[in-house]
Image (cartoon, rainbow, N blue to C red):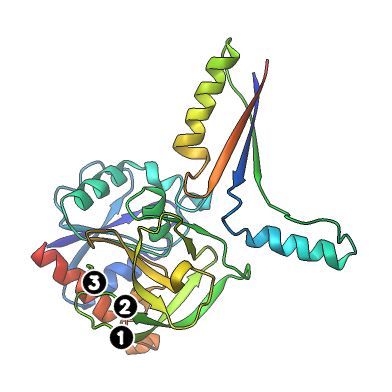
Amino acid sequence: MTTAVVVFPGVNCEHDVVHAIEALGGEAELVWHRDTDLAAYDGAILPGGFAHGDALRTGAIARFSPAMREVARLAATGAPVLGICNGWQVLCESGLIPGAHIANRDLSFICRFVDVEVVDTNSILTRSAEVGQRMRIPLNSYEGNWVDPSGEGRVVVRYVEDPNGSQDRAAAVANAAGNVVGIMPHPERATDELLGSTDGQVLLESFLHSLVTA
Amino acid sequence: MRVTVTIDRRPEIADPQGTTVERALHDLGFTEATSVRMDRVIHMDVEGGDPDEVRARVEDMCRQLLANPVLEDFTVQVEP
């Protein structure tokens, strides 16, 4: 059960994600965005950063990378696909999660711990957690303000206090099936006491558990 | 042909930059300015002899890449 961590040019959280997955007993490998075959993998994570320098719009160019065809194929088979921060923006641009992201309401780059609350456990990110479970996770983004005029996105984790204007205080949103999820704060940066919080572990454990049972 | 593409954020979608700029204009006394929107204009040269064909190609570019259908509308101007 191995997870592909897709590396676009400009991404900067890929090693943190691999480290966190391995620390939880899982297996993860870095995959270059030009790779055209992810058949060896059981799920995928799009890590945070600034894919293609956020040119045009966040995620707009990354969407056309060859590896994204494979990510879409994995998603269609029901395999777990998780986008963190910029990775969520890529999933929205790809149409794998409803909605899009705009600049934070106050035009500030937010870089601090935020409190979030699980509101729906029917997803690959939240299945091992409980409804109402609160956690402190670092938020690190400028365009975290999710909008979804379609109303089709399903919020699975919500900010306790609105930091950025995101619709329905959404911190994480799932597709209808629950196997594709985007989250704006970074669970991988809350997986070790040294980092100030281990609250993100349960989210990544949910992902790993989903690999086994997909 | 010289092509100008204008990408407008839909009116119902918030524009935090536009709101901030509008506030700054009001602070400067330009209170007559309202509904400020920070839209995007893209200029490009496009090879082709038929303006309608060029327009159709550029509209395809907008649908595939240049505009986000969730947030934005676009208009294409072709100068023969």
Q: What element carries label 2?
A: loop
In front of the other: label 3 or label 2? 2
State yes or no: discs 3 and 1 in contact (Cβ < 8 Å).
Answer: no
Do marks 2 and 1 share a chain? yes
Residue A21's disc number: 3
Q: Mark 1 lies on which chain?
A: A
Any part of residue A198 in sight: no
In front of the other: label 3 or label 1? 1
Q: Mark 2 points at which residue?
A: A119
Under mark 3, the amino acid is Ile
What's the residue at 57%, 67% (across, down)?
A: A104
Q: Mark 1 points at which residue?
A: A132
Q: Which of A186 and A12 is in front in this view?
A: A186
CA–CA distance in space, label 3 to label 1: 24 Å
Q: Which chain carries label 3?
A: A
Under mark 2, the amino acid is Val
Under mark 1, the amino acid is Gly
Coordinates of residue A29 in the picture (x, y in percent): 23, 60
State yes or no: discs 2 and 1 in contact (Cβ < 8 Å).
Answer: yes
Q: Which of marks 3 and 2 is nearer the N terminus?
A: 3
Instruction: Using the rendered view, name the quadrant where residue B36 is placed.
Output: bottom right
Coordinates of residue A86 in the picture (x, y in percent): 43, 60
